Amino acid sequence: MTESVTVKVKLVDKKSIKSFKCSPTETVKNCRKMFAESIGEDETKSSFFLTSREEKVGQWLRDSYPMEFYLNDLKAGGPDGADYLEWRRTSRAIKVILRNDAVKSVLIDDTKKVADLCVYISAYFGSQITISEQSLSEKNQDEVDVLYSDMTLREQGYGGECLLGLFIRTSDQTLGLYIKVPYVEGWISRKKGGGLVGKVWNKQWYILKKNKLYQYKTNKVLTSEPVGNTPIRSITRVKRIQDYKDVPAPKTPQANSCFELATTARTVVLMARTPQEMDQ
């Protein structure tokens, strides 16, 4: 018989931590049900959540997996040394593209796969919001991303605000979801060495495209390769630096166009050409 283990669970809504004993071989679904009963909550409205050490998006524990699948991540410790699961509400607000590009918000179950969300969104808003696959292909492909049906939004890196649209595949008439993703490009200077002292800046062309921030030496991106990229999900903080003095021209708009970009690996200081470009 497998020995039970004690797992610490942070109740996000109540801002408290509760210890919970379970068998490592027990499924997440059964453990979730037992834990919900122990705290007097509805098991259908909350679930276990694991904050990743490397990606701020985190993940929901899959019901069909055994608890032991996630125990090593807990032992390793999450951000700031966290060694607990979180107990969170699974509902989440997303925005859906309707007819004539109108947008409306709806609550979804964040633990559901995209295939299930397609069915729910279609039933909620009606089939009239669905566009054809041909119409989808005519959109700017840098600004849309077709989602995998067998994964959740969060598993595909989309843990923040989402703007989704429904389409129908030509081949088999099944429903799919696409997501509107940011696309911004422009010149940004990066402080060499990443520190707050020194006036050596490296000017590069940056493109925020889908799930990555790309760096190029030139704005002729069709004939050049990126010299680096940063996955958006690895970014933990973007912080504006007010009245930054260590710039080439302190009395120009550049003095108010600096910001720190922190990832799980490092922190760099960046400078846009104007505050307006930085806000993009």
Image (cartoon, rainbow, N blue to C red):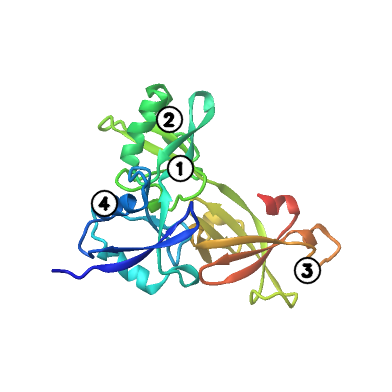
Q: Point out the frontmost of discs 3 and 2.
A: 3
Disc sitting over residue 135 in the figure: 2
State the separation of the CA atoms marked 4 and 1.
20 Å
Q: In the figure, residue 7 lies in which quadrant? A: bottom left
Q: Point out the frontmost of discs 1 and 2.
A: 1
Relative side of 101 to 174, left or right: right
Relative side of 2 to 129, left or right: left
Q: Point out the frontmost of discs 4 and 1.
A: 4
Mark 4 — residue?
29
Mark 1 — residue?
92
Q: Residue 49: image x %, image y %?
A: 39, 56
Name the kind of residue labelled 4 in the image.
Lys
Q: Residues within 10 Å of mark 2 (few under 14, many from 20)?
A: few
Q: Point out the frontmost of discs 4 and 2.
A: 4
State the separation of the CA atoms marked 3 and 2.
46 Å
Relative side of 184 to 104, left or right: right
| Secondary structure of the residue carrying numbered label 1 | strand
State the separation of the CA atoms marked 4 and 2.
40 Å
Q: Residue at x 43, y 30 (%)?
A: 135
